[in-house]
Amino acid sequence: MTDKIIKVDMLARVEGEGAFKVVVRDGKIVGTEFRIFEPPRFFEAFLQGRDHTEAPDITARICGICPVAYQMSSVHAMEMALGITVDGPLRDLRRLLYCGEWIESHVLHAAMLHAPDFLGYAGAIEMAKDGHGDVVKLALEYKKAGNAIVSFIGGREIHPINVRVGGFYKVPRKADFAPLREQLLRARDLAETFVDWTASFDFPDKERDYTMVSLAHGTEYPMNEGRVVSNKGLDIAVTDWPAHFREDHVAHSNALQGFMVDGGAYLCGPVSRFNNAYDQLSDRAKAATQRVGLPRDCKNPYRSITVRAVESLYAVDEALRIIDTYEEPDAPFVDYAPRAGIGMAATEAPRGLLFHRYELTEDGSIKTAQIVPPTSQNQPSIEQDLQSFIADILDRPDAEILHLCEQTIRNYDPCISCATHFLELDIDRA
Amino acid sequence: MSKPRLGVFKFSSCDGCQLSLLDCEDELLAVAGVIDIAYFPEATRADDVGHYDIAFIEGSVTTPHEAEMIQDIRARSTALITLGACATSGGIQALKNGADTAAFIDAVYAHPEYIDTLDTATPISDHVTVDFELRGCPISKHQLIELVAATLVGRTPQTPAHATCIDCKLAGHVCVMVTQGTPCLGPVTHAGCGALCPGYARGCYGCFGPKETANTASLTAQLAVNGADRRQIHRLLQTFNANAPEFRQEAENHD
């Protein structure tokens, strides 16, 4: 058993191209590599010399699954560089747009990419054809409500066109929300059922003591703004991010890997947000958490599927709250004059903290750009999970090991286009 | 009769166009009922290689491996259809064409020796025969459903190549260029989005690429009259379809 190679040429149901390798010697794991070979597209290079107003549309194209996250981090960073503040209804509309992306991205991942791992199917379509049709239909209907928000505010689901530095090109009228509100009220019932469904699975009994990093905001569950905190006592302004985190370029990956400056791996994403900001969830989301017995201090990454379902329920609640309190703003955007400056922002993409930093010249052109996506930051943690979680099953059949490896990686909802599509598992047993 | 076999392949891209298929919430299960989804890694682990009646290609060719892969897929496919701006014109990453690739790698990566990439991002049609191209960054899901429906019955999909400007007039939007002087690529951009941007009070930024017989020189002359400088005009044409000949050449005229 100690001498063999297991290889899977493709891990499906993730976004991007990657590979994984386990090196086993004398029955023990001596190395793990999570390798991203998604072709590099050089966004940070070709942003140089572009106008700052182009950043939200250009950076959106990094990821078709979470374009809103890129738009949000980029506009907030630009606004810091330009010295303007966007608040009131415009801030609320941004949060509403983000709620839409959380719902569509989380439900896509939970129902269509991750759930098949727990139920033993190749994919959601296979699941639907084999007795799970009702729940797949429910998930599609639920996901559609998230997309409806993004379309309504942003103009279309993928690469929305209505986001600009300073606010929006056009804002909706109060009366126009009525059909969306009705759709979200229906989605809220689906959201409750969905939490219960994800909590009914059998979860591998595995935990790790992660350093959980997320934004935290005093009065709201973190999305667009906040300080960068961890469950281990980190509490810094976003502008101090570069002093506490670093990116390393390793030979086996086309994505830079994120570490804390002391070299430690950390976890970002829904489980971190849930641990760090549980108190800010809506009453309905808290009640669902308790109903299904999801631990308040969840350290089991396989339960991330239920955390995503809870966050999605929260996002439906929050979207309805924003719609019900919305007052039309005086203008669709805050006007400003270009100037030289440095701007940084972090927002919470569905899969975790997304950091942008830009340096602008006097005419508002981009001099330098730095983008740190959540999957880059999670790569070291993925490697450590694999090392830790498969050590005690190396004597099991290869198919079982492969299944657990894939499921473990999917816990992260890795967006390899942001940071990976072909995940190749290669267990080298010498 | 057996169901047609579909393969969905990703090259250099953001995933957004293939995601459009999963975003067809009302139609997805119906489509899955009439098509055998043999290969679609974003959605399923099923890894059914062999011959495909329909191959959907997302993304452009930017690495030596991708240049080999597209030849293999073409050889195994009856109808090869490209989805979106990356596959059809090269996409946003074609901004590296003509630039110094080594400098680009230096700007992003600490160890350039780890990176294996071509100097260009090129459309699929530069490499193999393409049977149909669906435009957009991203594609329109309504056009995607039309494409699937048409392909199943063997007719040509109805995706008009006229200008977005015409759709804009039909939609009754106020012209942003005439009334506000806002730069707009609507007159030279392929229809398909339903004139989305002007409906949101902004100019079209050309994400569906050039229309048939696009008169870009005439448009850029008007943009200049409205006050746009050469750099703004260059940037406007150098985004998600930067490598489409009609956009690229006119941008070069404004270097």
Image (tube, rainbow, N blue to C red):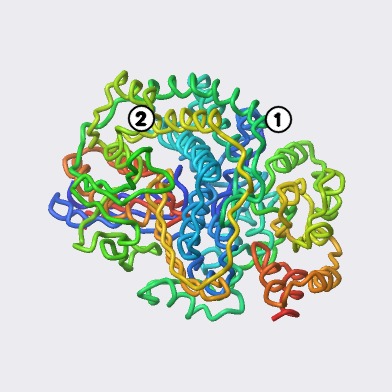
Q: Which of marks 1 and 2 is in front?
A: 2
Residue B2 appears in the rendering: no
Q: Which chain carries label 2?
A: A
Residue A3, horizontal then vertical, whole percent: 20, 52
Residue A114 appears in the rendering: yes
Q: Which of A112 and A162 is in front in this view?
A: A162
Is A330 positioned to the left or the right of B47 in the image?
A: right
Q: Which of B253 and A380 is in front in this view?
A: B253
Residue at image x 41%, y 47%? A348
Do discs 1 and 2 share a chain?
Answer: no
Task: Give residue A115's mark.
Answer: none
Please, what is the three-letter code of the amino acid marked with disc 1?
Met
Residue corresponding to mark 2: A306
Q: Nearer the viewer, residue A133 or B175?
A: B175
Q: Is residue B248 depicted above or below A229 in this figure?
A: below
Q: Which chain carries label 1?
A: B
Count the numbered circles shown: 2
Residue at image x 74%, y 52%? B132
* Corner quadrant of residue A240: bottom left
Task: Give residue B1's mark.
Answer: 1
Label 1: how many residues lie within 10 Å, few (<14), some (14-19) or many (20+)? few
